[in-house]
Amino acid sequence: MKETSVLCLLFLISLLSCTTNQARLTVSPSSSQFFEGDFVSLSCEEDDSSAGWTLRRNTSKRQRTQCGDGWGKPAGSFCKIRYMYPWDDGVYWCESREGPISNMVNLTVTGGSVILQSPVLPVMEGDDVTLLCKTKTTPSNLPAAFYKDGSLIRKQPTGHMTIQHVSRSDEGLYKCDISGHGESPSSWITVTDKHTTTPPPTSTSPPVLSVLSFFGSVCVGVLLALLVMLVRRCVHRKPDGEIQIIHIQCSV
Ligand SMILES: *[C@@H]1O[C@H](CO)[C@@H](O)[C@H](O)[C@H]1NC(C)=O
Ligand SMILES: *[C@@H]1O[C@H](CO)[C@@H](O)[C@H](O)[C@H]1NC(C)=O
C-alpha cells in the first residue's frame, strides 16, 4: 500500500517533468544574413507536437508578432518568408503555449550588395566554421577581407574563410568587405561548450533549462517503467478496495 503511493507519486512527478520539452528553431538556407528579396524557411523542430509551438519575432517596429500576423506564411511546422525586406531584420524564436522558448536567432536583411554567410546556430567548440562573403550581383566568389570585432583578421582570395577548431576566443562580431562592392552587416558567432548537446537557450537561466530538457528525454523511459510496475501491482492484487485507492491517488 505504501509502496504503491510512492510509485504513484513518482509517476506524477515524471509526468510533470515530461511536459518540459523543448523546440529548436532552424533556418534554411542556413545563414544569419540575407539580401533583400531572398527566400527563407524557418522551422520549429519540436520534441512534442502537442505543445503547440509558434514562431515569433521582434523587429524594430513590432514585438512578439507570430508567423502569419503581417509577415511570413505558416506551412505545417514551417514558416516561409518569400521575399525578405530590410524590416524583417530581427530576433526570431519559437514559443509554446506553456511559455518555454527555443533558441533565438538574429536574422539580418540588407538592402546592400554584400552579405556574410555565417552559422545561424551556435557552433560547437572544436568544429570547423566556414564564413562566406557574397555579393548580390556577382555569381563567382571575389576576394574578401574578414573582420572580427572591428579588426581585420584575414584577406582571402576566394571570399571564404575557414576557422579550424573553433574555441571560445573565436566568439565575436564578424563582418566582411569586398572591395568595390561594399561591406556586409555584422553578425555574432556564438561558440558553445563541447559537452552541450542542445544549443544553450539564450534566456536568463540556461543551466535550469538544460536540466529540464535532460529530464524531458529521460522521463519517457522512467514513465514506462513506473507504469509497468503500477500495472503489475494492480494485477497481482485480489480485486478488493486497493485498486480503487490506487485509482484515486493517481488521478489527482
Ligand atoms: C521582444 O520584445 C518584448 C517586448 O518589447 C520583450 O519583452 C522581449 O524580451 C523581446 N524578446 C527578445 C527575444 O528580444
Ligand atoms: C542578437 O543581436 C544582439 C544585438 O546585436 C546581440 O546582443 C545578441 O547576442 C544576438 N543574439 C544572438 C542569439 O545571436
Image: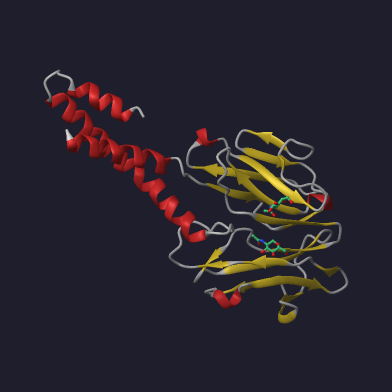
Q: Residue furthest top?
A: 239
Q: Residue at x 49, y 54 (%)?
A: 209
Q: Quadrant of residue 73?
A: top right
**How is the model colour-coded?**
secondary structure
Q: Residue furthest right?
A: 180
Note whether 61 is above or below 117 in the view shown: above
Which percent across, then down, holds residue 247?
28, 24
Quadrant location of ligand 2? bottom right
47 vs 249, nearest the viewer: 249
Measuring from the top left, give residue 49's x and y in whole percent.
Answer: 51, 35
38 versus 182 height, above or below: above
**What residue is rendered at 60% in x and 37% in y?**
77
**Is the N terminus in the top left, top right, bottom left or bottom right quadrant?**
top left
Q: Quarter of the image containing the C terminus?
A: top left
In this orientation, which residue lies closer to the viewer: 103 or 132? 103
The one nearer the camera, 134 or 26, is 26
Residue drawn at x 29%, y 29% is: 249
Q: Position of residue 54 (x, y in %)?
A: 63, 39
Number of marks in the rendered image: 0
Is 215 on the left or on the right of 35, as rendered?
left
Which of 224 and 111 lies nearest the eye of the viewer? 224
Does 200 sit above or below residue 99? below
The image quarter in which residue 114 lies: bottom right
Is 9 left or right of 204, judged from the image as shown? left
Instruction: From the top left corner, tell me how far across and down residue 80 is, in percent.
Output: 70, 40
